[in-house]
Image: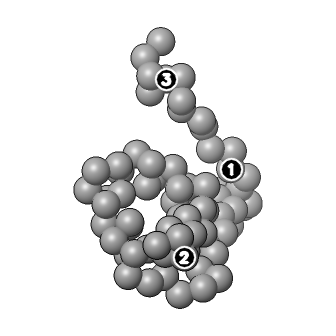
Amino acid sequence: MSKNQETFKPMELTYHQEGEFLTPDIKPLTPPSQEIGRYGYLRNQYLKEFKPDLLMELIFDDKINEHLVEVDQAA
């Protein structure tokens, strides 16, 4: 197995009927509990450029804002 196959986690979605179509039940990302400052913004830029896989994982797990606030507070 390759590394990608080992770490792949299928999304578990539920659906509801809208007319003839099934629509996924998704919720919007939670807004940050605190404002993201300069270092949180810089961390986001770093993740975009050098660690896009980690960025996508944080976004899909709805932990990106929490992570950026933590980085900003630590700096």
Residue under the point 66% across and 69% down: 27
Q: Residues within 10 Å of mark 3 (few under 14, many from 20)?
A: few
Instruction: Name the mark on residue 42.
Output: none
User: Front-most of 30 and 54?
Assistant: 54
Using the image as rendered, state which of residue 28 and residue 37 is in the foreground.
37
How far is disc 1 from disc 3 in space, using C-alphas?
Answer: 20 Å
Q: Which of marks 3 and 2 is in front?
A: 2
Pinpoint residue 69: horizontal percent, then vertical percent. Answer: 55, 74
Q: Which residue is drawn at 38% across and 66% down?
A: 43
Tell me if 61 is positioned left or right of 17 in this view.
left
User: Could you say where residue 65 lies in the image, as x and y percent from the top left?
Assistant: 55, 71
Would residue 17 be found to the left or right of residue 71 on screen? right
Is the residue under label 3 in contact with that under label 1 (CB below 8 Å)? Answer: no
According to the picture, the residue beneath numbered tag 3 turns out to be 5
Q: What element carries label 2?
A: helix
Upstream in sequence: badge 3 or badge 2: 3
State the mark number for residue 13: 1
Query: In the rendered structure, which disc, 1 or 3, sits on the residue that comes first in sequence?
Result: 3
Identify which amino acid the numbered label 2 is placed on. Answer: Gln
Residue under numbered circle 2: 73
User: Dot 1: what SS?
Assistant: loop
Q: Which residue lies furthest to the front in this view?
A: 75
Residue at 38% over, 81% down: 38
Residue 12 vs residue 20, the one in the foreground: 12
Figure check: 35 above or below 11: below
Question: Residue 54 in the image: x percent, y percent?
Answer: 45, 48
Work out which residue is located at the far left of the displayed protein and give it.
49
Outermost residue, top side:
1
Q: Can residue 69 be seen in this view?
A: yes
